[in-house]
């Protein structure tokens, strides 16, 4: 890739300072796939994340003291519990009546008193704590210091020189071997001495012991919200030293005078399922480590990188490059608001993919509010699965950026909440099917929590079902669809049983519900039939109908769905030309006109019920709503706006929103998204939004460059996926498509749209088609 010189004054001004700083540092080769820094991390949001899917570590890159903050994805507070509140069933008709009568505050009070889960809060994701590496004789800094995270190699490296010796420390999270592996090397034999110890903030006070050449931390998780801690956990660090001496003392393990040291870190809890904590973490860790006896670092690394690259290298992206990409990552983020740095956007894009690969792998838990990385016992919002936007946003980029495998944990979560949620549906609503409100946790709790104005929202599970369907729609694996159809059907069944007729408008609506988490200005947030609910339920019904059309044999259910679907409330345009957020035209009365949630625009993105080309009036109303909301919001909320502006076909507006996301107020030095505080959804939403600028796959059509900003005149994005199991490569120059390649994973017909021109392409599985623009028309090249 060659550097393109940009002629903006900002760049030219930065150039000479740049050259000097780059020369001073032991900078890694400029690479579009590398985060790098000239100093160790002081704050957690400066440390670099690595992960095996199940295990995570934040690498601080200290010289005399290295800190590896560790996570295991099932270490959460509490134990199996049932939050369904039986009082809700008798309160339900009264709450509905109050809502129908317009007494929204009264409905809220009653819901608060009798409709909330018990306990009213869910459990938190918790850290294991830190593995501390003390290096006697090394100070705070070293010469020629550099630390980096190579996204392609999935490896964090710290290197520096001290006492004339070059030290290199590498850390990986290996999915195939199920460990975090650390290699310590030095340029002189016998130069490595290190003391290992654990420090954990868990109030349950886990204990560290030495077993031969292993340092072991074991204990229990914490109790929370009156739910006792029921999980045993263990973290086991196996030390292999070449040369030198390993010795243990109390709760410390020491290495002296080694040539090279390898640390293999395994961690596990006794969690098996939301209702089963009978696992044996010690046996599991021993088994994991036993498999690695005699396996050299080179092989551990090679297996890890082959596995990672198998996913990561599917997509390549380039938005152009400037000299700004020679700077350390933290400096680029700081100067990004005023600098032309398109490859920072590309780095952020690929970082999102890197993070998903590192925190969401088959057999593990889905990405929570912080993915897998958390240094607290009670992180912000419990680090849970908030499913009124955040968890879904985590998975927006998964299918289009060719990481379908990473969706498996989310589908497994839906399997879990479909079971616990069937109980909640029965106990709290007297309904069949299953329901999940605005949050869930490791224990797959499904009742409304936190407060009526947050929790009384029955469409969380239904929204998750969109991802369950999308996984089929992108992959076209019929056996998979057969397996998940009962989940979708159960979610739909709940709504067939609980939708009620709105007495004023005569349509079928959810009641009680909210438009997350917005106060409509009429005494509360509670209402009947908020626009988002109607849209989510419409998608759910439609996707069930499509699934049934593939699988067949469910005609009675289809008839029921069709009847209900036709009675769902449709979209409404309000007095200010906006897309109404509620059945009533209340938008202008809302307590916060700039509310971060843009729930009523779900139909534009992530759904495709509203499109600029097929439903232009609704799209214009959505645009009006979006303009009123404004661009500035929390990290994830900016990311949602980015996706929306891309869907509305405004590339330059999308790019200006992206700039807000990439700036230092919304991106920490380690590129984690700042809500603030850290929340990973913004990272994933950012990756999704950039994809949407280049390629959109909706309503059986593939849009090429639907929202390309003028800031990225030349570039490519290859290895994407569209619905219908088709691969898409897009290359452009001078702001126009130069070439697109479609590669079919299944037989199908694809309608491709670019610059107002449409082409229908029929492809058999394995075939590909090369497309280009000729005299403004899309043609096969
Ligand atoms: C939703 C949002 C908050 C936050 C929380 C985790 O409730 O409204 O902004 O992201 O989830």
Image (tube, rainbow, N blue to C red):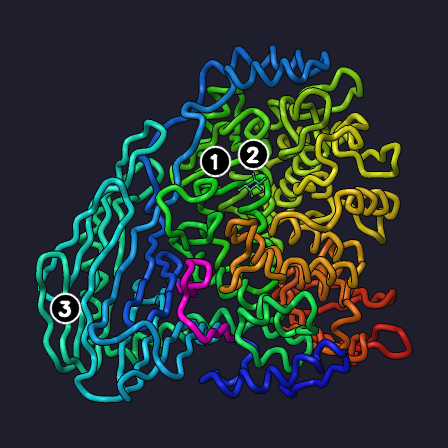
Q: Secondary structure at mark 1?
A: helix
Q: Nearer the viewer, mark 1 or mark 3?
A: 3
Q: Secondary structure at mark 2?
A: helix
Q: Residues within 10 Å of mark 3 (few under 14, many from 20)?
A: many
Q: CA distance from mark 2 to mark 1?
A: 8 Å
Image quadrant for the C terminus?
A: bottom right
Residue 491's disc number: 2
> Would you place residue 264 above or below residue 294 in this image?
above
Q: CA distance from mark 3 to mark 2?
A: 55 Å
Mark 2–mark 1 CB contact (< 8 Å):
yes
- Marked residue nearer the N-terminal end (2 or 1): 1
The residue carrying mark 1 is 418
Q: Nearer the viewer, mark 3 or mark 2?
A: 3
Q: Quadrant of residue 93?
A: top right
Q: Is residue 475 visible?
A: no
The image position of residue 502, as x and y in percent, is 74, 19
């Amino acid at each position: 890739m060659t550097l393109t010189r940009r002629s903006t004054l900002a760049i030219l001004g930065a150039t000479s300072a740049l050259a000097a700083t780059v020369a001073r540092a032991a900078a890694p080769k400029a690479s579009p796939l590398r985060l790098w820094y000239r100093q160790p991390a002081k704050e957690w949001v400066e440390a670099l994340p690595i992960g095996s899917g199940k295990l995570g570590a934040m690498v601080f890159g200290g010289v005399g003291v290295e800190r590896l903050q560790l996570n295991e994805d099932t270490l959460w507070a509490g134990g199996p519990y049932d939050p369904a509140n039986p009082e809700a069933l008798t309160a339900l008709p009264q709450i509905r009546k109050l809502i129908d009568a317009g007494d929204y505050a009264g409905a809220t009070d009653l819901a608060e008193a009798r409709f909330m889960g018990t306990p009213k809060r869910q459990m938190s994701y918790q850290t294991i704590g830190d593995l501390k590496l003390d290096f006697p004789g090394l100070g705070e800094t070293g010469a020629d210091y550099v630390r980096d995270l190579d996204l392609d190699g999935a490896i964090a490296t710290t290197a520096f020189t001290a006492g004339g010796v070059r030290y290199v420390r590498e850390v990986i999270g290996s999915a195939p071997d199920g460990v975090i592996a650390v290699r310590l090397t030095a340029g002189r034999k016998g130069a490595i001495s290190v003391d290992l110890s654990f420090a954990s903030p868990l109030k349950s006070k886990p204990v560290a012991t030495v077993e031969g050449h292993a340092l072991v931390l074991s204990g229990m998780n914490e109790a929370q919200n009156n739910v006792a801690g029921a999980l045993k956990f263990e973290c086991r660090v196996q030390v292999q030293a070449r040369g030198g001496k390993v010795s243990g003392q109390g709760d410390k393990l020491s290495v002296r005078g080694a040539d090279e040291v390898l640390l293999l870190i395994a961690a596990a809890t006794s969690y098996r399922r939301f209702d089963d904590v009978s696992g044996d973490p010690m046996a599991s860790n021993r088994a994991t480590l036993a498999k690695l006896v005699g396996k050299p670092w080179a092989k551990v690394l090679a297996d890890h990188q082959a596995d990672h690259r198998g996913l990561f290298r599917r997509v390549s992206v380039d938005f152009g490059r400037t000299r700004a990409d020679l700077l350390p990552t933290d400096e680029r983020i700081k100067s990004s608001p005023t600098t032309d740095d398109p490859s920072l956007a590309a780095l952020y894009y690929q970082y999102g993919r890197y993070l998903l690969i590192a925190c969401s792998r088959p057999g593990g838990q889905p990405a929570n509010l912080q993915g897998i990385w958390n240094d607290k016992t009670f992180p912000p919002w419990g680090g849970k699965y908030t499913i009124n936007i955040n968890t879904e946003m985590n998975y927006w980029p998964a299918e289009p950026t060719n990481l379908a495998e990473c969706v498996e944990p989310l589908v497994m979560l839906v399997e879990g909440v479909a079971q616990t949620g069937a109980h909640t549906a029965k106990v709290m609503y007297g309904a069949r099917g299953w329901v999940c409100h605005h949050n869930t946790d490791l224990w797959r709790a499904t009742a409304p929590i936190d407060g009526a104005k947050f929790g009384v929202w029955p469409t969380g599970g239904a929204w998750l079902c969109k991802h369950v369907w999308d996984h089929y729609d992108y992959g076209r694996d019929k056996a998979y669809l057969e397996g998940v159809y009962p989940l979708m059907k159960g979610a739909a069944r709940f709504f067939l049983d609980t939708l009620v007729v709105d007495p004023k408008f005569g349509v079928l609506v959810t009641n009680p519900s909210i438009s997350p988490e917005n106060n409509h200005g009429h005494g509360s947030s509670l209402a009947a039939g908020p626009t988002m609910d109607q849209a989510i339920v419409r998608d759910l019904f439609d996707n069930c109908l499509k699934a049934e059309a593939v699988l067949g044999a469910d005609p009675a259910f289809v008839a029921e769905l069709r009847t209900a679907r036709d009675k769902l409330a449709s979209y409404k345009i309000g007095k200010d030309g906006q897309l109404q957020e509620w059945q009533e035209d209340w938008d202008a009365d809302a307590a916060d006109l700039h509310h971060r949630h843009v729930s009523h625009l779900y139909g534009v993105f992530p759904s495709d019920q509203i499109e600029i080309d097929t439903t232009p009036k609704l799209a214009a109303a959505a645009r009006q709503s979006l303009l009123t909301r404004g661009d500035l919001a929390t990290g994830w909320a900016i990311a949602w706006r980015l996706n929306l502006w891309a869907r509305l076909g405004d590339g330059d507006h999308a790019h200006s929103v992206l700039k807000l996301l990439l700036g230092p107020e919304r991106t920490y030095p380690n590129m984690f998204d700042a809500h603030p505080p850290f929340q990973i959804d913004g990272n994933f939403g950012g990756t999704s939004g950039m994809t949407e600028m280049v390629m959109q796959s909706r309503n059986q059509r593939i849009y090429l460059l639907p929202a390309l900003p003028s800031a990225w005149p030349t570039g490519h994005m290859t290895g994407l996926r569209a619905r219908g199991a088709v691969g898409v490569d897009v290359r452009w120059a001078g702001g126009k498509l130069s070439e697109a390649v479609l590669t079919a994973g299944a037989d199908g017909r694809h309608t491709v749209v670019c610059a107002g021109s449409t082409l229908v392409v029929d492809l058999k599985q394995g075939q590909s088609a090369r497309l280009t623009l000729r005299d403004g028309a899309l043609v096969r090249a």
